[in-house]
Image (cartoon, grey):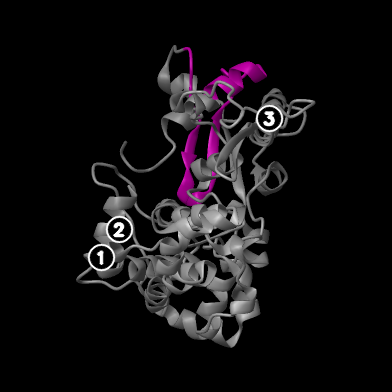
Amino acid sequence: MFERGLGQWRRQKRSSPKKNLRVSFIAESGVDHGALRKEFLTEMMAGVERKFFQGGSTGKTPKYSITDYHKEHFKTAGEIRAVSIVQGGPPPNFFREWCYGYISTGEIDRDSISKEDVTDPELSQLMEEVEIAEPEAMYDLLDRITACGAIILHSSVRTLPMLQQICSGMKLYGLCEMIVQQPQHFRDLFVAGLDEKPDAEFLMGAISPVFSELGSLRRQRESKIVNFLQDFIQHIEEEEEEKSFVVEERGTHVKITESDERDSRETESTGEAAKDEEEMKEKPKITVGCFLQWLTGQAHVPITSTEREMFKILIKFDHDFSVRYGKHTVCFPVVNACSNSITFPARHLGSYPEFRSIITQAVMSSREFSCS
């Protein structure tokens, strides 16, 4: 969806990114009252980060891409950032500190740049080779070192045209001017480190069930479903925390499993058998953010405290579906992302395994508004 969305964004002729964004997906019914926009901006921001930036969890820098620069893709990425911040999308909080410093001041603080800011794989490899090289081996690296000069500074300076183009796109709504005037106020929206990922506590705090009369049989069924929902959200959060992840240490892949009592490590350098790439790829899993996006169209915690306080997810219950649909064996919940609501069938969810199976199938089969 990202590539097509990027192309359609750049083809705007009768509209402007300054106007309220309205999204529609071909061959799908639905009027955009906010959820489609949030879904679109969530996917576009993830695509921008993946395609035009490189780095790790501590921050990323723009990729050095002359092709994307000439096509003004970085300017489009800047426009998407501005619209995402203003119109309820996720913030672009994945920049390295020096990148935000340049956006807010127009200058590079050379004292704040370190080797950790080198995100280009080729330059990172060259730095590693220089660090471990013997004196006599340095002569073999002179040509490569001379070609790029001071490696750390070169890796930053050469991406300045991309950053300048991003700033050009972020002039929407006067965003760049506001950042220059109040850099500290906007810092957390751009620099990596602010952990605003939704968790089970946030999600359960946002739900607002519409219960039947207290003491009734319907109320008992509804309370059981809410308990199952809490168990499900906490379970996917625990799975997310315990999953295996891959860490790169000096070009060596190390697999670490947090749930084990001791770290289990499989490295390529020790000669141990490495798993095939297909085996290393994780199967798609439901995360708390994924579940939130399925419910509301957005996978992030609202940016401002006022938005967080007002953010609610309405939980409804359908006790009369048998009258409408006749005899059947399974029912799926109905989500209305535009109104932040979900309606659970009161039957077919009698046990937690049954609830988990139905919800998992529903989420995995309809994770996006876009056609697959």
Residue numbers of the magenta segment: 329-358
* Amino acid at dot 1: Arg
Pointer 1 and pointer 2: residues touching (CB < 8 Å)?
yes
Q: Position of residue 131 (x, y in %)?
A: 60, 56
Against 166, residue 251 (above or below) is above
The relative height of residue 309 versus residue 113 in the rendered view (above or below) is: above
3D distance between C-alphas at marks 3 and 2: 37 Å
Seen in the picture, residue 330 relative to 297 is either above or below; the reply is: above
Q: Which residue position holds label 3?
A: 257
Residue under circle 2? Answer: 6
Q: Position of residue 323 (x, y in %)?
A: 46, 20
Magenta stretch encompasses residue 348: yes
Q: Which dot marks residue 10?
A: 1
Q: Which amino acid type corresponds to the residue marked 2 in the rendered image? A: Leu
Q: Nearer the viewer, residue 147 or 115?
A: 147
Residue 342 place in picture, x, y as percent: 54, 39
